[in-house]
Image (cartoon, rainbow, N blue to C red):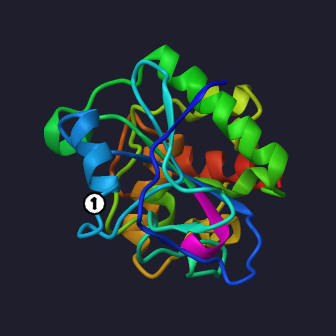
């Protein structure tokens, strides 16, 4: 796996925190060049550890042992300083604002290879491989409903459930990791990842069965 080096000035120290999360984003800008420029712009104060282009090329912006600025205000499993404990990957895609489209296979395969390398280097449990929308459901949609989480899980990255035989209450989303401060946003984030065909923001039996299956994997 070849990695292009393009250091970003936007980073600081982890202050001794270990890495136990992997956060996947989309760039949400019109072009890859614009996204890369922003991630390296000191005035923007944003960055990620890696960016994966649509052709599968991988650029390293920040070394994994230091903190990139990708998560913003976010929460997962009771933790709020997600940048301190995570590696962030930006996946090139225009996003919902600039013409959201499917992620090419070459790009997905590069994401898998990169994720496997990161997980091999750090103790990241499968439940801690998350979408930006999982950790900031009221603010973010990325990488969105077109990102193939089930295929990713089939390659050994993250979790994707089969429906369980019982039904789980929406409140049990907190047991998996979601912040339930905004329940409708958390439900929509769950649907975006695990039931992308219908983003209703309403809890139903299909969601309840999927969450039961997901909790059974823990």
- Splitting the image into 4 quarters, where does residue 67 fall? bottom right
Write the start and end of the magenta stretch as one range.
Answer: 82-87
Tell me where residue 20 appears, x and y as whole percent: 74, 64
Spot occupied by residue 4 in the image (x, y as percentages of width and height): 52, 33
Mark 1 residue element = loop
The N terminus - image quarter: top right
Q: Residue at x 32, y 34 (%)?
A: 93
> Image quarter for residue 120?
top right
Q: Position of residue 59 (x, y in %)?
A: 49, 37
* Near-viewer residue (30 or 142): 30
Residue at x-position 61% and y-position 77%: 13
Q: Is residue 28 magenta?
A: no
The total of numbered circles placed on residues is 1
Q: Is residue 95 left or right of residue 185?
A: left
Q: Which residue is rendered at x = 21% and y = 42% of the image?
A: 34
Q: Main secondary structure of the magenta part?
A: helix
Q: Is residue 203 above or below residue 73?
A: above
Residue beneath disc 1: 41
Please provide percent x and percent y for residue 130: 59, 53
Residue 122 in view, yes or no:
yes
């Amino acid at each position: 796996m070849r990695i292009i080096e393009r250091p970003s000035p936007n980073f600081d120290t982890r202050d001794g925190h270990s890495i136990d999360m992997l956060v996947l984003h989309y760039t949400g800008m019109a072009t890859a060049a614009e996204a890369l420029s922003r991630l390296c712009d000191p005035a923007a104060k944003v960055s990620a550890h890696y960016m994966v282009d649509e052709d599968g090329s991988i650029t390293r912006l920040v070394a994994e042992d230091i903190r990139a600025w990708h998560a913003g205000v976010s929460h997962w499993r009771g933790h709020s300083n997600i940048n301190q404990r995570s590696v962030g990957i930006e996946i090139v895609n225009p996003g919902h604002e600039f013409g959201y489209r499917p992620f090419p296979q070459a790009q997905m395969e590069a994401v898998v290879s990169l994720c496997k390398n990161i997980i091999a280097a750090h103790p990241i449990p499968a439940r801690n491989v998350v979408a930006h929308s999982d950790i900031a459901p009221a603010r973010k949609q990325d990488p969105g409903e077109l990102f193939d989480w089930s295929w990713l899980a089939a390659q050994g990255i993250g979790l994707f459930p089969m429906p369980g035989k019982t039904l789980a209450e929406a409140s049990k989303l907190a047991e998996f990791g979601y912040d339930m401060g905004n329940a409708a946003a958390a439900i929509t984030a769950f649907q975006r990842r695990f039931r992308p065909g219908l983003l209703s923001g309403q809890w139903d039996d299909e969601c309840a069965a999927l969450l039961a299956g997901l909790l059974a994997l823990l």
